[in-house]
Every structure is written in structure tokens, then in C-alpha cells.
Amino acid sequence: ASTIGIVGGGQLGRMLAIAAARLGYRVHIYAPDADSPAAEVAAEFTCAGYDDLNALAMFAARVDVATYEFENIPVAALDALAAVVPLHPSPRAIGVAQDRLAEKTFVADLGVPVAPWAPVDDRAGLDAAIAAVGTPAILKTRRFGYDGKGQGRLATPADADAAWDQIGQAPAVLEGHVAFDREFSVLLCRGQDGAVVTWDAPDNTHVDGILATSIVPATGIVAAQAADATATAVRIADALGYVGTLACEFFASTAGPVFNEMAPRVHNSGHWTIEGARTSQFENHIRAVCGLPLGGTDTVHPRVEMHNLIGDQANAWDEILSDPTAHLHLYGKADARPGRKMGHVTRLLD
Ligand code: ATP
Ligand code: MG
Ligand code: MG
């Protein structure tokens, strides 16, 4: 393949395109908005929307292989794309991951510990779910949630109305609250031949529902549970016949690692791999999608810290550049809205 199509134009697509360009590939981005962060470093094919099948067919005709950087693409559109051009990961993988109910069912069926959950299809269903799951609990929309959006918390059953109004839509799932010490993620990449590589599992800190920091190597409870969770993530990838980089988020609880959710794509908690690992999550994703051997994933520095630059935090770029341990990444977004991921900085520390 000499031209790679990437569906989605955000910063993940941008960093994928940069990794692909380094390997000599041309990249075409398929995105509904002009001037997306990815389009600034690749050719862009703008469309009316992700379900614009005519535009998708024209896009498919220009590329030799396709992937995606965004999980909320209609599966019907990806099926249409996959009928014309090799698409990795498969539409099935994204279909499972983009619906919290399908995801939890799939993962629990593999015997993986997850939070107790119940589907919620309407307001009466929420009361039934509370009776089944108990409180404290979190009500989450089945689809389209990210950065903690589309969630409502219930400390007691009396919070049901407030949580329902907060998410404002069904279908949803109610999840029992997991008492965890830390959060971490497993990043892996699986090739077309089924070979799997894994990176060190980062210890992740969220602020206001948004990833703030990923640190490797993890210590304490995360270090103790990383091997177990990594084996689980590999099992999930194998069961999906997955090709590409996959991220699985876990809670480190005293009872062991509890699966939270997966992302069928490169992931924010893997940005540290650009400078901190022998091969980045982006390059290995491109290698997998193109059927190439995967690169080594060992961590190349004693301590690696990735900090997201959210909203106006990116304004401190000049200060960051004066730190010799810091690698600055800016995504080329003009509007630094609060809560928006504008860039990140990775520090290689001793
Ligand atoms: P992302 O941006 O990672 O895709 P998201 O919007 O899909 O986020 P989740 O990862 O499901 O949301 O939840 C966001 C955060 O809320 C988690 O990282 C965790 O801190 C907390 N959380 C979610 N579910 C639970 C749970 N069952 N028990 C305890 N905390 C939870
Ligand atoms: Mg999510
Ligand atoms: Mg999450």
C-alpha cells in the first residue's frame, strides 16, 4: 500500500499521518470539517458527514488501505468502506467498542472482571437498574461519550432523576461505582499475522473526567496488576481478530484489575510512546494496518511523563520549550476552548 486513508481528522489522525509519512506513505484524511488537525499534515477529503456513502466511495477509490482514528463512525459506513478497500481494525471491533453495552457484554463473556452493570432503555428502566446494580453508580450513555461527557453520577437512588436529566438520552447503561486506587491502561498492537506487542502500562490521572497525565513505569498497585491486565487486553484483541493499536482502560482495585472500556484506535494514554518507547503506538498502528512487522515497544528512558495541555495550558509552550527534558506537541487547533485537548508534553526523566 502506498496511500493510507484515515477516517477522522483529530490529533490522533495527525500523529498517525506524521508516523505514516516517516515510513514513506501518503495519507488522505476523511473528515467532515475542513482544516482539521490531521488535514494540516496530510491531504484532506472533506465530506458532509461520516455517513455520506457517496463521498466515502470516492475516498476509498483514492486509498490502498484504510483505518480510523475516531470511534463514533457509523458501522454501516465502515462496512461500505471495507467492501472496497482493506480496513483495519475491522468494523466489528469498532462496533463492539462504540456501544458500552456491546462492549461490556463482549468483555464479560470472556470472563474479564467489569463493574456490575444493567442496560437502561427508559426512565423506568433506570429504577430497575438501580435495584439490580445498587448505588453509588454511574449512568452512562451507550454511545458517543468521551472525556466523561454523557455521564451522571448517583450517590443514592434519590439521584436517579438528576442523573437521568444529566445524560438527557437513552439508551444508556448503569454501572456500579468501582472503588479503585489508581487507573491505568494497556496499550497493545496486533499485526495481521496475529503477532502482538505491548507497551509498559501507563498510570493515568484524570482531572474533570479528562486524561491529565500518563506515567511509565507505573509503581505500586498498577505495577502489580499490569501483567494480569495486559494478558486480558491481549485476549480481547485476539477474540476480536483485532489489527492495529488497541487501548484498554482498567481500574486498579484491591480485588484486581477491573476493565473499564476500550478504544479501538491509538489512545491519549499512549502519546508518551512517541519519544518514550522504541516504536510509538502510531508507527506500530501504521505498520499493522499495512501488514508490516511490528517494532519493539520497550521503554527507552527510566521515567516518562506525558501531560496533556488542555485549553489555555497550551499557552505555556515557551516555558515548556525551555525545559531540556520536554518534548512539546501542539495539534494546530486555533480555538483553545476550556476542556479542549490542544497538545501534550512528554518529559524524559531520570
Ligand atoms: P474517555 O475519554 O476515556 O473515553 P469516557 O467518557 O468514555 O472517557 P469513562 O472512561 O467510562 O468515560 O469514565 C470516565 C472516568 O470516570 C473514568 O476514567 C473514571 O475515572 C470514572 N469512572 C467511570 N466509570 C466508573 C466506575 N464504574 N466506577 C468508578 N469510576 C468510574
Ligand atoms: Mg471512552
Ligand atoms: Mg475512559
Image (cartoon, rainbow, N blue to C red):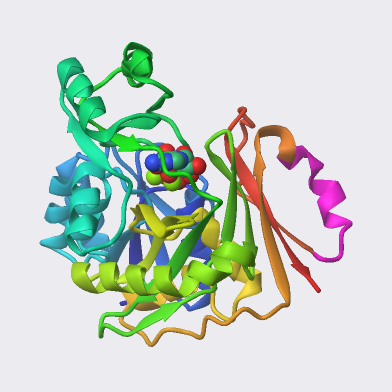
Q: Is residue 95 left or right of residue 144?
A: left
In the displayed structure, 276 sits above or below 72; it is below
Q: Is residue 192 left or right of residue 38?
A: left
Does the magenta portion include 289?
Answer: no
Q: Residue at x 39, y 78 (%)?
A: 287
Is residue 35 at least partly visible in the picture? no
In the displayed structure, 1 sits above or below 104; it is below
In the displayed structure, 118 sits above or below 41; it is above
Quadrant assignment, res 164 = top left
In the displayed structure, 73 sits above or below 301; it is above
Q: Residue at x 45, y 35 (%)?
A: 148
Nearer to me, 286 or 180: 180
Quadrant assignment, res 141 = top left
Q: Locate residue 269, reporting x and y percent.
A: 53, 57
Q: Quadrant of the N terminus?
A: bottom left
Is residue 131 at least partly visible in the picture? yes
Nearer to me, 33 or 264: 264
Count of numbered badges drawn on the protein: 0
Q: Locate residue 260, reporting x and y percent.
A: 38, 50
Q: Residue at x 73, y 38 (%)?
A: 313
Magenta stretch: dominant secondary structure: helix
Magenta span of residues = 314-325
Does the magenta portion include 315?
Answer: yes
Q: Is residue 99 left or right of residue 186?
A: left
Q: Locate residue 26, reporting x and y percent.
A: 42, 68
Q: Quadrant of the C terminus?
A: bottom right
Nearer to me, 223 or 332: 223
Quadrant assignment, res 106 = bottom left
